Image: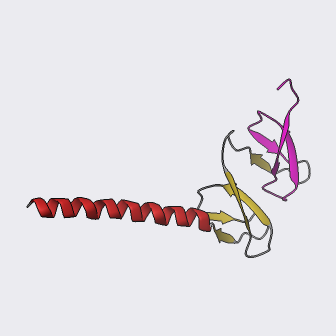
Amino acid sequence: MSSGAQSQLVCSGCQNLLLYPVGATSVCCAVCNAVTAVPLPGTEMAQLVCGGCHTLLMYIRGATNVQCSCCHTVNLALEGILNLFITSIMFFSSIIKMESITISLV
């Protein structure tokens, strides 16, 4: 941390932008005192607009639901749901292929 490099994230309590030193694991907001966990390095983030209050929300890519910290609306993360759907299709497709091989061998 001697380089003084900083990164930023959105406070989980009041949505203010927080600056923090690279390497920190959590950040305490000076405005609302909420403690926000810092994502691990390399974590892919995604964004969506809250359907309740139109606040821009950031979340870890792959999540299927994101709760807004402002209005508490639970938003569907379509990207995560789509990935879950595709994974399910691929899984069931492989089961069907395995069953058809078993049936043809009998």
- Residue pushed farthest right? 31
Q: Which residues are magenta?
A: 1-29
Using the rendered view, name the quadrant where residue 96 is placed.
bottom left
Residue 94 in the figure: left or right of residue 6:
left
Using the rendered view, name the quadrant where residue 74 is placed.
bottom right
Please give the name of the residue rendered at 66% of the width and 70% of the height, measured from the top-left corner.
75
Residue 46: give x, y in percent of width and height: 69, 57
Q: Which of the two residues, 61 or 105, is positioned nearer the viewer here?
A: 105
Please give the name of the residue rendered at 45% of the width and 60% of the height, measured from the top-left corner.
87
Is residue 37 shown above or below 77? Answer: above
Residue 70: give x, y in percent of width and height: 79, 66
- Residue pushed farthest top? 2
Residue 15: give x, y in percent of width and height: 84, 59
Using the rendered view, name the quadrant where residue 13 is placed.
bottom right
Please give the name of the residue rendered at 77% of the width and 71% of the height, measured from the top-left corner.
71
Quadrant that contains the C terminus: bottom left
Residue 33 in the figure: left or right of residue 85:
right
Q: How many marks?
A: 0
Quadrant that contains the N terminus: top right
Is residue 70 shown above or below 41? Answer: below
Residue 23: say if magenta: yes
Q: Which of the two residues, 14 or 65, is positioned nearer the viewer here?
A: 65
Residue 9: say if magenta: yes
Residue 5 in the figure: left or right of residue 84:
right
Q: Which of the two residues, 22 or 104, is positioned nearer the viewer here?
A: 104
